[in-house]
Amino acid sequence: MMQPTVRIPTIDPMPLPGPVWLMLTLLLVTFTLHVLFMNAAFGGGLWTLFNLIRGRSDEHPYSRRLSQELARMLPVLLAFTITLGVAALLFVQVLYGQFLYSSSILIGSVWICVIPLVILAYYGYYYVSGTTDQPRRSTIVAAAFSVACLATIGFIFTNNMTLMLRPDRWIEMYRAHPAGWHLNLGEPLVYPRYLHMMVGAIAVFSAILAHIGMLKAKSDAGYGYWIVKRGAQVYALCAGLQFILGMWLLLSVPRPVMLAFLRAPLPASIFGVALLTVISSIFLMLIGSSGERPNAMVHAGMGMMVITLALMIVLRHLLRQAFLGPYLQWDSMQVRSQTSVILLFVVLFVAGLGTVGYMLAQLARASRRGNQVRNVGSSGV
């Protein structure tokens, strides 16, 4: 195990509003929700882009229709991604502030670029959603630009979140370039972790899309089953690729940290369960979508995917603990519980999730009404 050989900034003297275990729980919950919407925003953007290009031909009417429906969802998904990401980032700052702030300063000039990139991606998605009914070349360019912005943001975050795990590199990097024009490109973890996240986003949204296809099949079987089959196939392909990327990621971890991580009973158990759930989700998706009429096994496959995602997020947290264990000083953190504030946060958070669910239900209902109107119009012609 690494031994602390560097000086770590002192912990924020302000007491925590609640115990560490509660802050960790809130971090994991908010981050899981953020990752779900982030995967949908990025993966959905790629699916929209591909079907915009494919749908330009009259031979692929389903692709054109899918690109139109997905494009209307993209600004909403990105808005939820940003909102939930702020909550998760706040809890990271509370628990790992001295590490995150240090790495953020080292890449500060690049880190600040995240804000304009998010704004540009947001405007690009809005443009795509407003022009997809009459798509033109600029619509495809805007979709590609927004996806590229989100991919760049992911790469910047990966650099920061891996750099915060390596306090032994901070002094050397700061002395080389104190102006903040750093990226953590010399870290072996960066590339497999980034690819694991990006490919995972495609896999997650593909599973969600297969689930959506099952719902659409109730009103339009041909179109719904077309979505299910393609979503399930892409999910299985990307989930299989994740095994390779996951092994690369694990082998990139410094050996002392990796051994300490894998020998601990909790990470090893969660890792084993996660392997079972992801394999189960692949088989459920493929078997459920293989027939002429896909069945409810597709829904079960998506459920197993969500469980796998949650387990992977817990493993990510435990790996961070293995990296930072020698430097963490949570025992010395002061806690001054503010029960009323925490209860208010929980109530507002649950109410917010209910509002999000209601908005998504309304969006889906409006989409179904629009499809029915188009179907009636087509039959009238």
Image (spheres, rainbow, N blue to C red):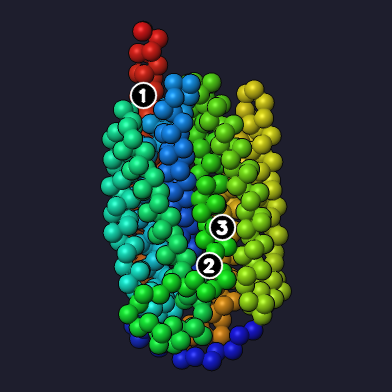
Whether 142 is drawn above or below 84: the answer is above
Secondary structure, mark 1, is helix
In percent of width and height, residue 66 lies at 44, 30
Q: Residue at x 62, y 48 (%)?
A: 239
Residues at marks 1 and 2 touching, judged by CB atoms closer than 8 Å: no
In percent of width and height, residue 273 lies at 68, 57
Q: Which residue is mark 2?
A: 190
Q: Which residue is mark 3?
A: 196
Tag count in the figure? Answer: 3
In this view, the residue in front, 292 or 142, is 142
Whether 58 is drawn above or below 334: the answer is above
Q: Residue at x 35, y 42 (%)?
A: 141
The disc placed on residue 248 is: none
Q: What residue type is disc 3 on?
A: His
Whether 235 is drawn above or below 102: the answer is above
Cα gap from disc 3 to disc 2, whole angstroms? 10 Å
Cα gap from disc 1 to disc 2, whole angstroms? 45 Å
Q: What residue type is disc 2 on?
A: Val
Q: Residue at x 52, y 74 (%)?
A: 186
Question: Comparing marks 1 and 2, which lies closer to the viewer?
Answer: 2
Q: Which residue is mark 1?
A: 369
- Label 2 crowd bin: few (<14), some (14–19), many (20+), radius 10 Å: many
Q: Earlier in the sequence, mark 1 or mark 3?
A: 3
Secondary structure, mark 3, is helix
Rendered-image quadrant of the N terminus: bottom right
Question: Comparing marks 3 and 2, which lies closer to the viewer?
Answer: 2
Cα gap from disc 1 to disc 3, whole angstroms? 37 Å
In percent of width and height, residue 2 lies at 61, 85
Q: Earlier in the sequence, mark 1 or mark 2?
A: 2
Question: Comparing marks 1 and 3, which lies closer to the viewer?
Answer: 3
Rendered-image quadrant of the C terminus: top left
